[in-house]
Amino acid sequence: MKKLLLLLIILTVFFSCTNKTASNPPTLNITSAKWITTTDHRFGFVEVILSGYSNTDSVTVENYGDGLISNMKLPMDANHRFYNDTIPISFTADTIGAGYFTKSTIVLAYNNSQIFADTLYSGKLHY
C-alpha cells in the first residue's frame, strides 16, 4: 500500500512538472527589417529597423561596435508585437570605403529557459 501511494505521488509530480511549452515552441516572426547606413564622413554606422511578433517573454537584438557585443531588448506590446525605430548594429572607425559590404545580427527570443535565435543578413550595403 505504501509503495502504491509513493508511486502515485511520484507520477503526479512527474506529470504536473512536464514541459507544457513543448506543444507551443518559441516562435519569432520578423515582418520587416530595414537596414540603414549613415556616415559623418569619419565614422560609418549601420542600423536596422525591425518589426515583428514573438510568442516569447522577450526579444533582443545583438549589436556590436568597438569590439563589445551586447544585446538590446526590444519593447513588446500586450499582443507580443515589437517595433523599434532604429537599432544600432555596428560602427566603423576605419576609413569609409566606397564599396559594398554586408552585415548581420542575431535576434534572440527568450521564453523561460528556452531560447530561439534567428540570424538576419543585410544584403548589399554601402556608405
Image (spheres, rainbow, N blue to C red):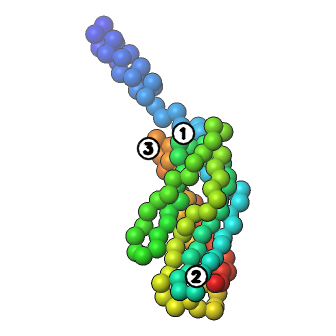
Q: Position of residue 95 (x, y in %)?
A: 52, 91
Camera-nearest residue between 46 and 54: 46
> Label 2 sits on what residue type?
Asp
> Label 3 sits on what residue type?
Ser
- State the separation of the CA atoms marked 1 and 2: 48 Å
The answer to which of marks 2 and 3 sits earlier in the sequence is 2
The answer to which of marks 3 and 1 sits earlier in the sequence is 1
Q: Position of residue 111 (x, y in %)?
A: 50, 43
* Quadrant for the C terminus in the image: bottom right
The reply to whether callout 2 and callout 3 are in contact (CB within 8 Å) is no
- State the separation of the CA atoms marked 2 and 3: 42 Å
In this orientation, does residue 84 appear? yes
The picture quadrant where one finds residue 45 is: bottom right
The reply to whether callout 3 and callout 1 are in contact (CB within 8 Å) is no
Q: What residue sits right under mark 3 in the picture?
A: 113
Camera-nearest residue between 60 and 42: 42
Q: Residues within 10 Å of mark 1 (few under 14, many from 20)?
A: few
Q: Residues within 10 Å of mark 2 (few under 14, many from 20)?
A: few
Secondary element at tag 2: loop
Q: What residue sits right under mark 1 in the picture?
A: 22
Q: What residue sits right under mark 2 in the picture?
A: 40
Q: Nearer the viewer, mark 2 or mark 3?
A: 2
- State the separation of the CA atoms marked 3 and 1: 12 Å
Camera-nearest residue between 91 and 69: 91
In this orientation, does residue 105 appear? no
Q: Is residue 6 above or below residue 72?
A: above
Secondary element at tag 3: loop
- Tell me which residue sits at (64%, 87%) in the image: 100
- Tell me which residue sits at (60%, 45%) in the image: 76
Q: Is residue 95 above or below residue 22?
A: below
Camera-nearest residue between 85 and 63: 85
Left or right: 123, with 117 as reference point: right
